[in-house]
């Protein structure tokens, strides 16, 4: 949530409180929530650009943000005075509105909006707080008295999931404070170490492991510049969000919870908002050349945020408007908005049937929202219309901000879809007079592709980028820790094979299960042969004259590699390929050169290294069985050729082990 986003609250509307709100529809929603509970089966996973449930049925996240536990305090003045909290709402480190409405009723009101999931922000401070939440913050929920914030968070998770709502845990802030200005919450390690952050996530992901309707871990909210330092996507420094998120996600999967979806936001803001100084929102733009290969590779979802009063180059700070003329998303024409949303987020969720890319995942717009009945700006209203249109059309997953807020006599925080007064009286978007409702109904009930391709028909592509940190993404190799030369190790997630490399000092890799499926190397089999190749011992023909060649043994294929700077030491990691049958084996070998220009179409599944770095990949139905690099130090030792092989019919019997390498 952007700073000052709701200063518009001063502009009060004579909103309409209608009587029909709470009781008329009781029966329908009781029914609809029962069907929500039985309508999907956890755990969730991803298939291409879709989120699917355990039965393979599409589960589009139609979510809302239930905030408060992450903090509402503005950071100065008396904590107990609501005036010192964002929008005048004091949450006391629990979800908002527990002072005015029983939790169960709040949840029934959510269900009536048509959502199926909730993003549930928390702060690090909430986890470790031992202070009992004061009774006056829980007036409508006496059963929650004498509990710590974390214990209340537990109860909220339980209550939501019991009604069938999927819950995404969201690490929103370090401190118990409203997000997102210069509040020391800009980075996961601004106020403490990355290791502490990882430990906290392992704690949270483990805590809810046995509640399978807790479907996601949203690693950090709106990573952005602190006073002096911009976060980066790659680079290996302290502020490298790509590397930190890769590390925490990998460890959550290996040590805490392998079923949970991992949500990674792009970078929300870099630069200083001054004229002639670069300042913008990278969001998911960098993903197209640098994406994550998680050990369980069907669990990743990328996220981005959009508001009418922020923009591709606009912070959302009203005070900027005098000196800066960066337009907000609200001020873009519909055509520009479409292009920007596509460039910063939508492209990641490639269209149905399109060629899969290494970055193809679902995209969750985990925050978007607008003032409600006291919002009269045409800019904001038209933005809502156009933005919901894009969400519907691109079929993106979404989470509106926020679900709950405070109101008195129809005035107050009407960004909230459901606002409650101090007696519990509700004013919801479903009551007459809220201009947002028509588009919300359109969005929530928009028809979406039900037909998700079956897993075996959809290939997966993932990339490796070990230049800042080893990426031993194969669990098999990670646990066995074979002896490999060099300090950088890279391997494909189990089930995928290595089919591409880049011509760079720190070679990047491309992995897939295309055409030949996930069981080419039977990694579930403890005795599955894996060898580390460090010499030319297996080379049988000179397929890259004048180059050092690391080649897999006969009928094995690449799954990883390791190296020291400039490939002075290097290894190829090879796994035995399952033969399709006794008369079909790897027989057709060819060299693919890529040191001068890309091999043809090497980027057809996305560029996996920056523009200008040549790439080489085998064809979709081939395996890579070796790579070659120059001996010449002065030209830099970089991979220059791949040995690709295809299955072919073996002439005569099945014992031809000659490996007639062309
Ligand atoms: C949440 O993020 C903050 C800020 O980086 C970090 O200090 C804290 O440890 C994180 N908590 C969890 C549970 O990840
Ligand atoms: C989850 O684990 C907790 C603590 O280990 C236990 O008390 C609880 O009964 C478990 N819940 C389920 C649904 O298994
Ligand atoms: C605005 O953002 C774009 C990227 O979205 C960037 O290329 C451009 O340099 C930015 N303009 C300024 C003034 O920072
Ligand atoms: C989109 O914005 C334009 C103005 O830029 C407006 O005319 C149009 O009505 C909006 N579309 C929707 C669906 O609200
Ligand atoms: C969506 O459609 C269903 C079935 O027509 C209807 O009952 C429900 O109220 C609609 N949801 C919203 C939010 O309008
Ligand atoms: C072996 O596999 C090939 C290709 O899938 C197939 O055409 C052939 O019939 C198979 N042979 C046997 C004996 O199963």
Image (spheres, helix red, strand yellow):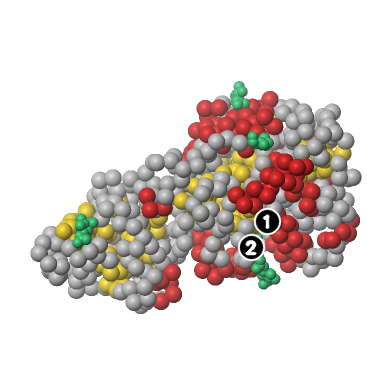
Q: What residue does disc 2 label?
A: 211
Residue 40 vs residue 332, the one in the foreground: 40
Image location (x, y in percent) of residue 510: 35, 56
**Contact? badges 1 and 2 (CB < 8 Å):** yes
- Please report the residue visible at 31 percent of the width from the left and 53 percent of the height from the top: 515
Local secondary structure at mark 2: loop
- Answer left or right for 141 relative to 536: right
Residue 161 marker: 1
Where does the N terminus fall, quadrant-wise?
Answer: top right
Is 574 on the left or on the right of 363, as rendered? left
Quadrant field for ligand 4: top right
Looking at this rendering, what residue extends furthest in the left direction? 652
Q: To which quarter of the image does residue 421 belong?
A: top right
Q: Is residue 68 visible?
A: yes
Indicate yes or no: mark 1 CB to ligand 2 under 8 Å. no
Q: Indicate the position of residue 170 as horizontal and vertical percent values.
A: 64, 55
Is residue 510 visible to the viewer in this orientation of the structure? no
Residue at (85, 56) in percent of width and height: 141
Counting residues from the N terminus, which is met first, the one under dot 1 or under dot 2?
1
Q: Is mark 2 within 8 Å of ligand 2?
A: yes
Is 173 placed above or below 252 here? above
Which quarter of the figure has residue 201? bottom right
Q: Label 1: few (<14), some or many (≥20) within 10 Å?
A: many
Q: Is residue 469 above or below residue 591?
A: below
Q: Secondary structure at mark 1?
A: helix
Q: Any mark on residue 53, and which?
A: none
In the picture, measured across the screen, residue 207 lies left or right of residue 20, that is left
Between residues 35 and 68, which one lies in front from this camera angle?
35
Residue count near mark 2 (Cα–Cα under 10 Å), binned few <14, some 14–19, many ≥20: some
Quadrant of the snapshot with the C terminus: bottom left
- Using the numbered discs, state the Cα–Cα distance from disc 1 to disc 2 in whole angstroms: 8 Å
């Amino acid at each position: 949530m952007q700073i000052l986003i709701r200063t518009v609250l001063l502009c009060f509307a004579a909103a309409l409180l209608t009587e029909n709100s709470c009781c008329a529809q009781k029966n329908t929603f009781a029914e609809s929530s029962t069907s929500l509970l039985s309508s999907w089966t956890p755990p969730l996973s991803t298939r291409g650009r879709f989120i699917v449930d355990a039965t393979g049925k599409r589960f589009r996240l139609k979510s809302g943000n239930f905030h408060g536990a992450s903090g509402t305090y503005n950071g100065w003045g008396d904590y107990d005075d609501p005036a010192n909290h964002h929008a005048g709402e004091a949450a006391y480190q629990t979800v908002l509105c527990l002072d005015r409405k029983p939790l169960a009723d709040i949840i029934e009101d959510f269900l009536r909006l048509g959502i199926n999931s909730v993003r549930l922000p928390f702060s690090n401070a909430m986890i470790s707080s031992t202070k009992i939440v004061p009774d006056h913050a829980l007036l409508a929920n006496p059963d929650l008295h004498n509990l710590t914030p974390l214990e209340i968070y537990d109860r909220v998770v339980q209550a939501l999931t019991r009604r069938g709502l999927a819950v995404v845990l969201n690490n929103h802030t370090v401190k118990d404070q409203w997000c997102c200005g210069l509040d020391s919450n800009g980075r996961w390690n601004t106020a403490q170490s990355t290791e502490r952050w990882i430990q906290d996530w392992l704690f949270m992901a483990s805590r809810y492991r046995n509640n399978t309707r807790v479907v996601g871990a949203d690693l950090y909210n709106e990573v952005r510049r602190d006073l002096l330092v911009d976060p980066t996507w790659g680079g290996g420094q302290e502020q490298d969000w790509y590397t930190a998120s890769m590390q925490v996600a990998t460890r959550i999967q290996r040590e805490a919870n392998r079923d949970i979806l991992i949500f990674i936001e792009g970078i929300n803001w870099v630069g200083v908002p001054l004229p002639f100084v670069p300042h913008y929102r990278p969001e998911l733009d960098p993903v197209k050349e640098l994406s994550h290969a998680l050990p369980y590779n069907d669990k990743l979802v990328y996220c981005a945020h959009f508001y009418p009063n922020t923009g591709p180059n606009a912070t959302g700070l009203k005070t900027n408007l005098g000196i800066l003329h960066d337009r907000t998303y609200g001020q873009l024409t519909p055509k520009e908005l479409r292009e920007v949303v596509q460039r910063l987020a939508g492209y990641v969720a490639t269209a149905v049937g399109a060629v899969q890319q290494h970055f193809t995942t679902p995209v969750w717009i985990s925050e978007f929202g607008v003032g409600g009945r006291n919002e009269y700006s045409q800019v904001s209203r038209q933005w809502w219309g156009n933005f919901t249109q894009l969400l519907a059309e691109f079929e993106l997953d979404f989470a509106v901000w926020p679900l709950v807020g405070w109101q008195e006599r129809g005035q107050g925080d009407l960004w909230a879809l459901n606002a409650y007064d101090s007696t519990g009286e509700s004013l919801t978007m479903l009551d007459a007079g809220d201009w947002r409702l028509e588009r919300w109904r359109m969005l929530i009930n928009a028809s979406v592709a039900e037909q998700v391709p079956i897993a075996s028909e959809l290939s997966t592509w993932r990339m490796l980028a070990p230049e800042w940190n080893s990426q031993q993404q194969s669990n098999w190799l990670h646990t066995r820790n074979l002896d490999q030369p060099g300090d950088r190790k890279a391997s494909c997630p189990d089930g995928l094979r290595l089919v591409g490399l880049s011509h760079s000092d720190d070679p990047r890799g491309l992995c897939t299960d295309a055409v030949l499926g996930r069981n080419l190397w039977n990694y579930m089999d403890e005795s599955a042969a894996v060898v580390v190749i460090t010499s030319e011992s297996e080379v049988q023909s000179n397929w890259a004259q004048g180059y050092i060649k690391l080649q897999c043994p006969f009928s094995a294929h690449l799954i990883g590699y390791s190296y020291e700077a400039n490939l002075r030491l290097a290894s190829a990691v090879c796994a035995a390929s399952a033969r399709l049958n006794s008369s079909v084996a790897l027989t057709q070998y060819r060299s693919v050169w890529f040191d001068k220009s890309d091999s043809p179409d090497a980027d057809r599944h996305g560029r996996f290294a920056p523009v200008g770095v040549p790439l080489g990949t085998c064809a979709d139905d081939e395996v890579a069985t070796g790579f070659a690099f120059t001996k010449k130090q002065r030209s830099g030792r970089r991979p220059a050729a791949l040995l690709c092989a295809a299955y072919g019919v073996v002439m005569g019997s099945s014992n031809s082990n000659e490996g007639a390498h062309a």
